[in-house]
Amino acid sequence: MNVSLMALKSSAAEGVMVDAWWGLVEKQGPLKYNWEGYAELVKMCQEHALKLQVVMSFHHCGGNVGDSCSIPLPPWVLEEISKNPDLVYTDRSGRRNPEYITLGCDQLPLLKGRTPIQVYTDYMRSFKERFNDYLGNVIVVILLLCNF
């Protein structure tokens, strides 16, 4: 990764973009965040004077055209979905899309006693606490994917 970032910097790139996958960071359980892989990337970007755009990705990665990896939703979320399939979108034919949580339950405490909005807020608060020293200098853009 270091060599790749060095090559990018030498090619006059200003920065890079990374998805902060919910399924990776909160994998171990509710409110159990592991940002260490992302922390390494942030430090490498700082060392190479590269800016970083971070996309808060609250959906499943993989299974679509061009996808070469698979990052599911956190296991504890998938467990809740298995108990209550109405947490995900359902089309007119009754097919469910388990890639993300439906907006219809944003205000319902269906994720271990928290609403999806609370879960997303806690995740982003954890990100801010972990990377506060880098906000505005290394991390210059944060995007939130709204999956609807």
Image: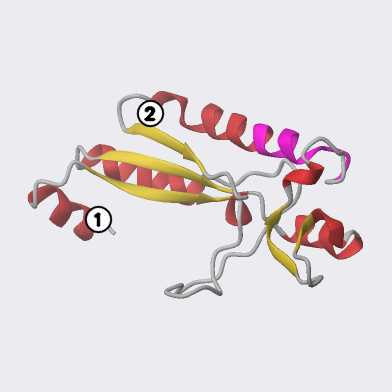
Q: Amino acid at mark 1?
A: Asn
Q: Is residue 47 above or below residue 71?
A: above
Q: Secondary structure at mark 1?
A: helix
What residue did someone put label 2 on? 134
Q: Name the dominant secondary structure of the magenta segment.
A: helix
Q: Is residue 76 above or below residue 97?
A: above
What residue did someone put label 1 on? 2
Q: Residues within 10 Å of mark 1 (few under 14, many from 20)?
A: few
The image quarter containing residue 90 is bottom right
Q: Where are the magenta residues, as a range? A: 112-121
Q: How is the image coloured?
A: secondary structure
**At 62% across and 50% down in the image, what residue appears?**
148
In-image side of 142 versus 10 (left or right): right
The Cα–Cα distance between marks 1 and 2, rounded to whole angstroms, is 18 Å
**At 46% across and 31% down in the image, what residue appears?**
131
**Given this view, does label 1 or label 2 mark the residue nearer the observer?**
2
Q: Secondary structure at mark 2?
A: helix
